[in-house]
Image (cartoon, helix red, strand yellow):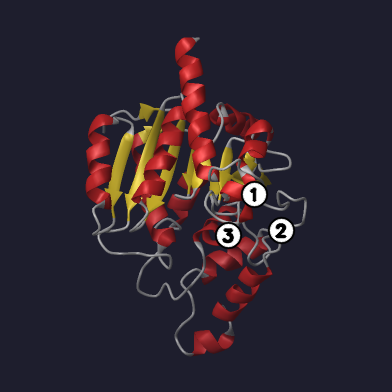
Amino acid sequence: MSELKEIDLGVVIPVGPDSIAEVLDTLDSVDHYLLCRKCVVVVDDCTDDGTYDVLSQRQQSHPDLVVLRNQRRNGLQFLSHSLAAAYRYLVANYRVQTVLKLDTDALLTGYGLEKDARDFMLRNPDVGIFGLHSVNADLSVKDYRMHTQQIQFELSFRRRLRGYGPWYRHIAKKAVENGWGLGDNIFGGAYFLTTRNIRKMEELGYLDPPYKGWNSSMQEDVYFSMCTVAAGFQMGQFAAPCGPLALDWRELPRPAAELLADGYKVVHSVDKGSNTTPERNGGLTARDVFRHHRLHSQLTHASA
């Protein structure tokens, strides 16, 4: 068995069809702001629109990029399966303590994120997944009732009686025993997993969910949050207002210039909501503001 390559951070990005422009922008932000030793794993969901070809070509010039390709189209229903394969790949091939998962509509926007994550892990050794957990960027309490209701429906006696009980029911039982509230989760736009947690989930079989018998619409962030607690770890808040992640489910939390001025290092929903429009961003889209900021900081670094 060959020795594992040591890196400072793993990054996983799932990619579906019709998103190549977004994922290339996300990859550019990762390359620009993560100056540490890293491996970036992109999971291509069996796309047939040229996405896989573009990613494979990029891989040739980016030695820290790995492109995995699903054997079948997983879509959102089986996104947990796509990500589980990527997490298994990272811990099988690299010695690394932390993995960052990013959606294609998330961007890195600041330097030093890997150090922030490492420091958070040292302060919170019992945490296995961290990101946007209990408090939203606008200081409201996160509401996960829709996930609770979905899980209650899937675990219902009627569903089990009809043979449609979800595969994860034994994991949910263990997670509840460990203090998990049904549906409680770390938001999936961007979050960190510790590799201690990933290895424990792998050991318990949580990273090998089946297709047949899955019988669930559970979103991947809820799934891995549930698995984390079932594996004996906790969830942690690492997002605004007390962390470097500025995330919101349906929209960019604030205009791009404000997020940059306040030093946030990961943003989500880059193209959604009123805060992304030219009217709120000095005549540019929010994505363009973030891109121009990267270019300016690159030129500043080059001249320093």
Residue at 46%, 19% in the rendered image: 299
What is the x, y in percent for residue 298? 46, 22
Q: Residues within 10 Å of mark 2 (few under 14, many from 20)?
A: some
Q: In front: mark 3 or mark 2? A: 2
What is the x, y in percent for residue 266? 57, 40
Where disc 3 sits, the SS reads helix
Where disc 1 sits, the SS reads loop
Alpha carbons under labels 1 and 3: distance apart:
15 Å
Say which residue label 1 marks. 132
Residue at 35%, 45% in the rendered image: 42
The disc label shown at residue 196, or none: none
Alpha carbons under labels 2 and 1: distance apart:
9 Å
Name the residue type under label 1.
Leu
User: Which badge, 1 or 3, comes first in the chain's sequence?
Assistant: 1
Name the residue type under label 2.
Lys
Say which residue label 2 marks. 142
Say which residue label 3 marks. 226
Q: So how many labels did they put on this image?
A: 3
